[in-house]
Image: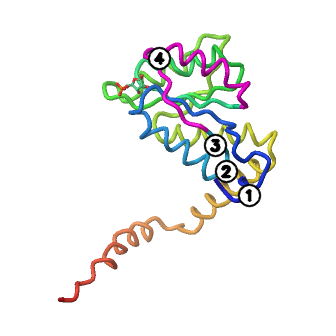
């Protein structure tokens, strides 16, 4: 968490609940957690499976709002019903991250999450890491309407992202420096 968030009124109180169907989803969902961390947005992370722990899912989703959670990010793979089920039990905005599945590369997860019948919405992001990062950024944008420090953190994130792109306008030089850079660390070791 950033210093400004640690000192602010939002410190310590999780505003975003990141849930995922399995510990195997963490490789993807940690990017949502890291992005929220970078923005100073307090969050919690839990494995909550729609089909392996349905009672826990119902309890988590139906009590999230009263515990102070304002946005739920739900990641799942395969027949990914977790985000839709969470949305059905919570009035909070639910952002779904399709985790890349082995059999169908996450296309199954994407369609399961995106194709919600009208009535219970799930905001669906891209498959995999990009979706996890963007779910966190979208959660921050939603929270930014209420919390000025989160809006400001998001503004700074965007500015720094833009500055990084503008700092390396020539991709050939960027590739060259990436190739040359490791050589700096391969100095011959002195004999003992
Ligand atoms: C879903 O099944 C999870 O979201 C995960 O993406 C997928 C596979 O889970 P594991 O078999 O790796 O636990 O419930």
Residue 93 falls within the magenta-colored stretch: no
Mark 1 vs mark 3: which is more N-terminal?
1
Residue pointed to by mark 3: 137
Instruction: Give the CA distance from mark 2 to mark 3.
Output: 12 Å
Is the Cβ of the residue at disc 1 closer than 8 Å to that at disc 2?
yes
Q: Is residue 117 above or below residue 169?
A: above
* Label 1 SS: helix
Instruction: Give the CA distance from mark 4 to mark 1.
Output: 37 Å
Q: Is residue 101 left or right of residue 145?
A: left
* Label 4 SS: loop
Residue pointed to by mark 1: 4
Which disc, if any, is residue 40? 2
Instruction: Give the CA distance from mark 1 to mark 2.
Output: 8 Å
Residue at left offset 73%, top offset 31%? 68
Is the Cβ of the residue at disc 4 closer than 8 Å to that at disc 3?
no
Residue pointed to by mark 4: 53
Mark 1 vs mark 2: which is more N-terminal?
1
Give the camera-side residue of 96 and 20.
20
Coordinates of residue 192 in the picture (x, y in percent): 18, 89
Residue at left offset 69%, top offset 37%? 15
Q: Is residue 147 above or below residue 164?
A: above
Instruction: Give the CA distance from mark 1 to mark 3.
Output: 18 Å
Q: Nearer the viewer, mark 1 or mark 3?
A: 1
Mark 4 vs mark 1: which is more N-terminal?
1
């Amino acid at each position: 968490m950033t210093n400004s968030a640690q000192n602010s009124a939002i410190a310590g109180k999780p505003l975003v609940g990141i849930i995922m169907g399995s510990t195997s989803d963490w490789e993807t969902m940690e990017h949502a957690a890291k992005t929220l961390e970078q923005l100073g947005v307090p969050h919690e992370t839990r494995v909550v499976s729609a089909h392996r722990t349905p009672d826990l899912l119902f309890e988590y989703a139906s009590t999230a709002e009263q515990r102070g959670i304002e946005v739920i990010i739900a990641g799942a793979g395969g027949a990914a019903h977790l985000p839709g089920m969470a949305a059905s039990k919570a009035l909070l905005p639910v952002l779904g991250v399709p985790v890349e599945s082995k059999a169908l590369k996450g296309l199954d997860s994407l369609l399961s999450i995106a194709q919600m019948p009208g009535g219970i919405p799930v905001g669906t992001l891209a498959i995999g890491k990009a979706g996890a990062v963007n779910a966190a950024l979208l959660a921050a944008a939603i929270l930014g309407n209420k919390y000025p420090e989160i809006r400001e953190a998001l503004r700074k994130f965007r500015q720094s992202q833009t500055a990084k792109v503008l700092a390396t306008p020539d991709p050939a030089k960027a590739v060259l420096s990436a190739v040359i850079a490791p050589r700096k660390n391969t100095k011959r070791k002195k004999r003992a």
